[in-house]
Amino acid sequence: MTTIQEQKFGVEIEVAGVARHLIAEAVAEGTGGRITATHCTGYDTTIVTDQQGREWKIMNDGSIPYANGHRGSEIVTPILEYTDIEMLQQVVRKVRATGAIPNKNSCAIHIHIDGRQHTAKSLSILAKMVYKNEDIIFDALQVHPERRRRYTRPMDEEFINKVVKERPRTDRELNECWFGHHNPHPSRYNDARYRGLNLSNKWRNINTLEYRWFNSTLHAGKVKSYLQLCLALSAKALNARAASHRKIQTDNPKFNFRVWLVSTLGMKGNEFKTARYHLTHYLPGNSAWRHGQPTNQNQTGASC
């Protein structure tokens, strides 16, 4: 059984508004590392090497507009483990202190979860779970409408229908469902990647599952919450035998989403208290009572 805490991940955080060297200095301070290279590659990358010898990259991102006279930057972490989340949060706090701007309309956070353990079956389960809850996920995370249209599109219904009907058993069969044809070596910028859940990277050399729902933020608690959600989804898919793809219909999204986080994804207890708060904060409804908090005249409401 794979747990939330056993998986590895990487994070990309897009920000704007300050010079790249200031962001690099903040990353170095947050990791206890040092700047070891500047102006590398075609992305004008600055590299910070942390105390474990891992490289954090701060690079140009042309999709982010200029702000305060500075080009947008993307912070790309090395492969991290669950115990590194506190360090990542410290980096986020240090970058925030520079005055960097997480522009909601144009910036994003992309989270990559290690895909090496996943099979065609587990990825099919993951895709169905996401499709089933995706409407609430988009609302909970307040995905900007422009990003929904372009860079963070909902799950492709044709792909889901193929997964449900054909039940892919092999890597090739799932690949053909995802791309519509066999594409064992997809390009980095293939069009299929622009989904909230992007499986294209599973067939690239990085072998990750990419989650693209998240508006950029320099709130350390939200970054941790987003990470825990992605890790929980991946763990559930690896451990589950099956999943439904039937869309959730509810008049109390906050309650249903909280129950899903706790009961289905295992995000219960103090470890995930902050995540439950941030992930349900913007949803309408009552997280504790299915039919609203009971009054003296009506004590029949269900709680969770």
Image (tube, helix red, strand yellow):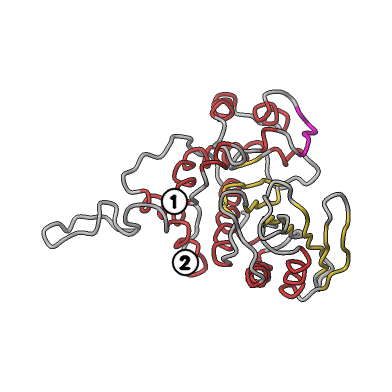
Residue at left offset 50%, top offset 64%? 272
The answer for how far apart the CA atoms under marks 2 and 1 are is 14 Å
Q: Quadrant of residue 2?
A: bottom right
Closest to the observer, 135 or 147: 147
Check if residue 227 falls in the magenta segment.
no
Q: Secondary structure at mark 1?
A: helix
User: Relative to 275, is 208 on the left or the right?
Assistant: right
Closest to the observer, 87 or 214: 214
Closest to the observer, 259 or 286: 286
Where residue 299 sits: x, y (%)?
17, 59
User: Relative to 178, is 144 on the left or the right?
Assistant: left
Residue at left offset 59%, top offset 24%? 166
Q: Quadrant of residue 85?
A: bottom right
Where residue 260 sits: x, y (%)?
44, 51
Q: Is residue 193 above or below residue 102?
A: above
Q: Secondary structure at mark 2?
A: helix
Residue at left offset 81%, top offset 70%? 52
Assess disc 1: are there few (<14), some (14-19) or many (≥20) residues with their C-alpha within 10 Å of its C-alpha. Answer: some
Q: Which residue is tagged 1?
A: 260
Check if residue 187 falls in the magenta segment.
yes
Assess disc 2: are there few (<14), some (14-19) or many (≥20) residues with their C-alpha within 10 Å of its C-alpha. Answer: few
Q: Which residue is tagged 2?
A: 273
Where residue 246 sits: x, y (%)?
44, 34
Looking at the rendering, the stretch of residues picked out in magenta corresponds to: 183-188
User: Relative to 31, is 49 on the left or the right?
Assistant: right
Q: Main secondary structure of the magenta part?
A: loop
Residue type for callout 2: Lys
